[in-house]
């Protein structure tokens, strides 16, 4: 990392780094080429050319059906039971949206889009997610704070402009616990603030995207509030925010700043609790190498490529998410 200069803050901490350093992306990432454009739509995976992925389609039906059933139990089941189950289903739905934007489960993009559009989490428009995530998959720009919309890094100049309170909040999120407890509120709030500015300026025709998103929110809100009798604030606080916190467990250890592109992406092995909920995207180095393979082929493919992937990513491997928590217990 000497070629990158001094790193002051890193929002994706890894155990092989010194606990005394809070790194930040620097000039070497910003020097990358900026001429590449992101495709408006993801290519259809070769395996999808003539088939429908039945496992993925069934999982989508399970996510929506389970969400309808569990939320309908509001007032019948205690909230301490209902909310965690619903949060898990919303987390699964978010994982499925990620799968869908990569061209699954059918060869028909319009059908895939319809399957992923319903905003159970309310705060994230599907089309904005597609746009930002496909930019994230320009691998030579991974973690660049200017070019990677999912980067958790900041340049020294940006860091210097932050208030003391903001810096403190970001430092708290250097631990896995801080990322889960504080990061969910932070992520949603930061995203909505940025989107408000984009709506005002109509950047990238974002007004139309948000209008469509809000229309899709109407049936979710009507079902939750009118049919189920659940106040929206309870839905958001007890289900949506915890679901986002679960997703942040996955993203916390996915990437690091490194001069070599393959070494920027981690692998979390042996995660048989959260791995299925993330549709095995914990094998993240494989996902960035072959983003079009379906979730149910990950383990077979990973076993075949394990040695190659680990050699390429510099041994950035965690045994489980408990290993992530252990290594990242302190900032």
Image (cartoon, grey):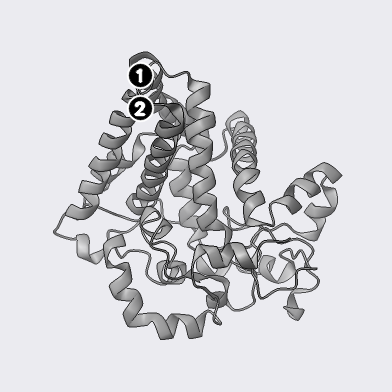
The front one of 32 and 56 is 56
Q: At 67% across and 50% down in the image, what residue appears?
A: 178
- What quarter of the picture does the N terminus occupy? bottom right
Q: Which residue is mark 1?
A: 228
Residue 270 vertical placement versus 62 (above, below): below
Residue 88 vertical placement versus 221 (above, below): below
Residue 300 rendering spot, x and y as whole percentages: 28, 74
Is any atom of residue 240 visible in this view?
yes
The front one of 193 and 168 is 168
- Give left or right: position of 35 versus 126: right
Residue 258 rendering spot, x and y as whole percentages: 64, 74
Is any atom of residue 163 visible in this view?
no
- Give left or right: position of 119 versus 311: left
| Marks 2,1: beta carbons within 8 A | yes
Q: Residue furthest left?
A: 50
Element under disc 2: helix
Q: Which residue is mark 2?
A: 71
Report crowding for label 2: few under 14, some 14 to 19, many 20 or more residues within 10 A (C-alpha): many
Circle nearer the N terminus (2, 1): 2
Q: At 57% across and 38% down in the image, what residue appears?
A: 203
The front one of 166 and 144 is 166
């Amino acid at each position: 990392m000497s070629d990158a200069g001094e790193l002051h803050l890193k929002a994706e901490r890894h155990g092989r780094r010194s606990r005394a350093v809070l790194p930040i992306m620097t000039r070497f990432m910003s020097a990358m080429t900026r001429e590449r454009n992101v495709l408006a739509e993801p290519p259809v995976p070769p395996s999808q050319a003539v088939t429908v992925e039945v496992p993925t389609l069934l999982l989508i039906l399970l996510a929506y059906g389970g969400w309808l059933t569990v939320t309908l139990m509001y007032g019948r089941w205690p909230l301490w039971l209902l909310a965690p189950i619903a949060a898990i289903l919303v987390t699964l739905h978010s994982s499925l949206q990620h799968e869908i934007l990569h061209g699954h489960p059918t060869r028909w993009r319009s059908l895939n889009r319809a399957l992923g559009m319903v905003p159970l989490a309310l705060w994230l428009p599907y089309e904005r997610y597609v746009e930002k995530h496909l930019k994230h998959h320009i691998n030579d720009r991974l973690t660049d704070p200017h070019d990677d919309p999912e980067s958790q890094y900041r340049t020294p100049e940006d860091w210097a402009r932050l208030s003391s309170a903001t810096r403190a909040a970001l430092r708290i999120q250097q631990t896995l616990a801080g990322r889960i407890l504080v990061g969910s509120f932070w992520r949603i709030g930061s995203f909505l603030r940025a989107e408000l500015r984009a709506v005002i300026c109509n950047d990238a025709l974002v007004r139309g995207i948000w209008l469509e998103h809000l229309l899709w929110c109407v049936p979710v809100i009507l079902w939750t509030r009118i049919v189920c009798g659940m106040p929206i604030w309870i839905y958001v606080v007890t289900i949506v925010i915890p679901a986002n916190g679960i997703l942040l467990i996955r993203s916390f250890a996915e990437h690091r700043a490194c001069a070599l592109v393959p070494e920027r992406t981690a692998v979390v092995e042996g995660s048989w609790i959260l791995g299925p909920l993330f549709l095995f995207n914990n094998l993240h180095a494989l996902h960035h190498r072959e983003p079009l393979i379906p979730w149910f082929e990950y383990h077979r493919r990973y076993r075949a490529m394990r040695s190659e992937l680990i050699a390429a990513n510099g041994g950035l491997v965690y045994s489980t998410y408990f290993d992530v928590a252990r290594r990242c217990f302190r900032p």
